[in-house]
Image (tube, helix red, strand yellow):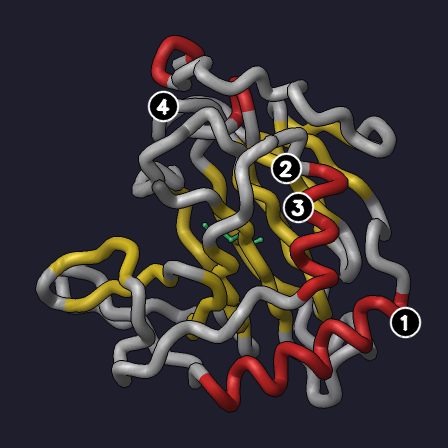
Amino acid sequence: MMSEVPSSIDPGAVPRVRPPDTVLNGVGIWRGWLDPQAQATLVECLRGLVRAAPLVTPVTPGGRPMSVRMTAAGKFGWVSGPKGYGYATQHPSGVPWPPIPASVMAVWESLSGCPRALECMLLNWYAEGARMGLHQDRDEADLSCPVVSISLGDSALFRVGGTERRGSTASLWLESGDVAVMGGASRLAYHGIDRVRHGSSRLLPGGGRINLTLRVVT
Ligand SMILES: O=C(O)CCC(=O)C(=O)O
């Protein structure tokens, strides 16, 4: 509900470069924000990041492995295991999370509308068949800051509802280079990825999808 989102930060405090191309249940979507060259350069950078902080398969507290594999950059990453889930200052192997790439920081500064500094970039890797069930992002302390999401690689069917799990939902295909911003009334919207069209993009040899979500955690 709107009233659940604290209003300590005016979501329009930092002007955005241009309005979104589409709005899906309150989630703004900027189509092709990263052009093909910027996408390829970012993927190269992410390869180095994954070497430093390898992908892991998160396990739900109920003991089920998730189909996406994950890592992170910045001050915090999100980890999940039998003992629970939440933000951690280190990769599960004990190494610090690598720094957030400068081009990702630039996306945050252009599109978040948020004056706070980015603290976390989560990387989700969708190999063939991976998906993400409907969920809310609510492990962050300051819900007045949006979650900004960058899509790279294969097209993904993105579903967004409201703040009730059983409410009605709407979907669209996210393409490589698109950026989605969940803020204000949509900050706590249920959302997920129903499926990915494997091999639909040529960005990643062999197919697959990378999603980066940018967050303020504290
Ligand atoms: O992969 C996506 O586009 C969505 C990712 C997501 O919902 C999340 O990381 O919370």
Q: Quadrant of the N terminus?
A: top left
Q: Nearer the viewer, mark 3 or mark 4?
A: 3
Question: Badge 1, how many Cα within 10 Å: few under 14, some, many 20+?
Answer: few
Return the disc, 2 or 4, that comes first in the chain's sequence: 4
Q: Taking 109 as reference, is 34 above or below it?
A: below
Mark 3 element type: helix
Return the disc, 3 or 2, that comes first in the chain's sequence: 3
Question: Badge 4, how many Cα within 10 Å: few under 14, some, many 20+?
Answer: few
Q: Amino acid at mark 4?
A: Glu
Question: Badge 3, how many Cα within 10 Å: few under 14, some, many 20+?
Answer: many
Q: At 83% from the left edge and 27% from the top edge, which residue is drawn?
A: 19
Mark 2 element type: strand
Q: Is residue 205 left or right of residue 7?
A: right
Q: Nearer the viewer, mark 1 or mark 3?
A: 3
Which of the 4 quarters of the picture holds residue 153? bottom right
Disc 3 to disc 2, how far (Cα)? 10 Å
